[in-house]
Image (cartoon, helix red, strand yellow):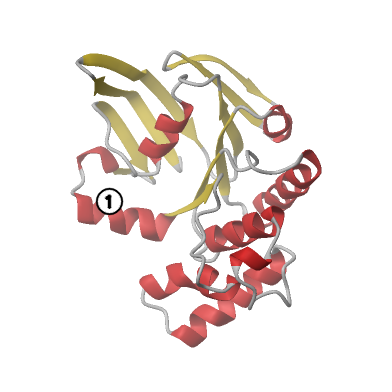
Amino acid sequence: MSVITTTDLKKEYSLNGIVIKALQGVSLSFEAGEFAAVAGPSGSGKSTFLHLVGCLDTPTAGSVFIGGTDAAGMKRNDLALLRRSTIGFIFQAYNLIPVLSAIENVSFPLVLLGSSRAQANERALQVLDQVGLGGMENRRPKEMSGGQQQRVAIARALVKRPKLILADEPTANLDSTTSREILELMLKLNEQEKTTFIFSTHDPLVMEFARRLISLRDGMVEKEVRR
C-alpha cells in the first residue's frame, strides 16, 4: 500500500477577486521508503502540494489518501490526529520553541500523543544522539547554530516514528556545507528507518540527493525522474 496517493488534486485561492490555480490536477503516489523531491520555480505549487498531503490545508478538489485513508473528507479534529500520529514535519525556519531546550522540543510531540515525560525524554535522547546531538540536549535554540537547530527539527520529526516526513525547503537557511551534511543525515535515516521523505525545494543540492525528482510548473507535473 502507498504511503501517500493523490488523485486529480486541485487547489484554488482567491486574491483580490482573482482566482489563483495553485494546483491543477496532480496525481502522484509515494511508496514506503522513498526519498523524493517535488521541485519547481516560485509559484509552481510545490509548497501547496506539501501542505495538502501534510493535512495542513484542504484541497479544492481531488483526493489525498494517507495509508489508505482519504484525508480530503475528514473533519478538522480527525485531520489533526492523523497529522500528529502519522506525519513528521521539517520546515526551513526550523519552527523550534525558543524557550524550550533541545530535549523538550523533541519530546513535545510524544507528550501530545500521551507518553509520560520519562518515556518521551528517553526516546528524545535516543533520537538526538542519532542525529549527532548527544550531550546537547539542554541547549536552547539560540545557543545552537542553524545546522544544529535543523538537526533538532529532524529529531523532532523522527521521534514519534512516523511513516512519512515532509520537509519544506529544509536547506533554505543553511550554507552549502551544512546543507550537504543535513541531506546526508536525512538520507542515512531514510535508509535505516525506511521512513518516506518528501521534500519541496528549489535547491539543486536537494534535487541531486533525491532518488525521485518530480518537477512542477504552473500547478501541474511537468516531468518525473527516478534514479
Give, as a three-letter code, the residue at label 1: Leu
In this rendering, position of residue 58 left or right of residue 142: left
67 left or right of 33 in image: left
Please, is residue 125 above or below residue 15 in the view?
A: below
Q: Which residue is at the far right?
A: 177
How far across and how far down the image is residue 75, in percent? 18, 49
Q: Residue at x 50, y 55 (%)?
A: 95
Identify the residue under disc 1: 79
Q: Is residue 199 visible?
A: yes
**Which image quadrant for residue 151?**
bottom right
Viewport quadrant of the N terminus: top left
Query: In the rendered view, does 125 fall on the left or right side of 12?
Result: right
Q: x%, y% of residue 98?
A: 51, 65
Q: List x then y, in percent, for residue 186.
A: 68, 50
Q: Nearer the viewer, residue 104 or 118?
A: 104
Q: Is residue 149 above or below residue 54?
A: below
- Which element carries disc 1, helix, strand or loop? helix
Q: Nearer the viewer, residue 7 or 128?
A: 128
Q: Is residue 1 visible?
A: no
Assign the C terminus to one quadrant of the image.
top right
- In percent of the image, x 27 and y 36: which residue is there? 58
Q: Quadrant of residue 189?
A: bottom right
Q: Nearer the viewer, residue 136 or 27?
A: 136
Q: Quarter-wise, where is residue 153 in the image?
A: bottom right
